[in-house]
Amino acid sequence: YVAMEEAVRTGAPVRVAVESSQDEGEFYQGMTPALFELHWPDAVALAERIDSKVKTVLDLGAGSAVWSLALAKSRPKVKVVAVDRRRVLEHVTQGFVQQHGVTAQYEFRAGDYHQVALETESFDLVLLGHLLHADGWEGSRALLRRCKAALKPGGQLAVAEFVAPEPRWSDYAAAVFHLNMVMLTENGVVFTGSELEELVRQAGLQGLEWVQGPGDYPMLLAANL
């Protein structure tokens, strides 16, 4: 409680920020594997709604690769570039990909997803699986601009997130997760649905569509029209 009070009072995280280069993936290396089963049903539902023409996928902050694995397993011709910190890729991502038998469909690219080199207009689909909440407003704007630049004309962006209701604090789980962001990140925030839509539109993406899977929170699809 002392740490929580200090974080709320100062606005500073109680540890090295989980998204920072100082952490270098240590936090997510330990946490991400436990989230695979939680996200898998939604990942499968999302994969079913992705355009059948998608062949090249960019999975940013891949973690367990849950969001791209559902697509890769159902479509053998899909190729995925998975980006994450090196320790996450080596200790988490590669293991899940190997376990699901699709290693040949993956390229692993180590680095900060805000900075790692990305090809321009090269991907049919960019996946952001629970990243934006750790980046806050400005970080999310910058990341979404990177996604827009990486997408081919006509490509799709898929965003999976905790989605706060309006009023924001009427969902207990989203409110608690927002408090986690205050304690663990520099600028993290749980966005409402309208805020996520605003961010995506500001990046120049259009044709927004919400996809409801079996989980509590819908996923957002947008197009690079």
Image (spheres, rainbow, N blue to C red):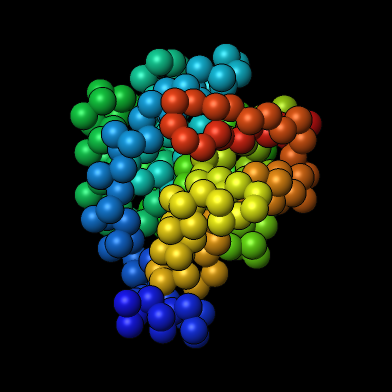
Q: Can the viewer see residue 149?
A: no
Q: Residue furthest front?
A: 170
Total count of labels: 0
Residue 206 drawn above or below residue 177: above
Quarter of the picture holding the N terminus: bottom left
In the rendered view, does 219 fall on the left or right side of 64? right
At x 56%, y 19%, the residue is 49
Q: x, y percentage for residue 215? A: 44, 32
Residue closest to the eye, 81 or 209: 209
Residue 147 drawn above or below residue 6: above
In the rendered view, does 114 fall on the left or right side of 176? right
At x 36%, y 57%, the residue is 85
Quarter of the image holding residue 221?
top right
Residue closest to the eye, 215 or 223: 215
In the rendered view, does 99 fall on the left or right side of 28? left
Q: Can the viewer see residue 160?
A: yes
At x 55%, y 61%, the residue is 189
Q: x, y percentage for residue 27? A: 30, 62
In the rendered view, does 177 fall on the left or right side of 218? left
Q: x, y percentage for residue 20? A: 43, 69
Quarter of the picture holding the C terminus: top right
At x 25%, y 35%, the residue is 96
Quarter of the image holding residue 102?
top left
Q: x, y percentage for residue 26? A: 28, 63
Residue closest to the eye, 181 or 44: 181
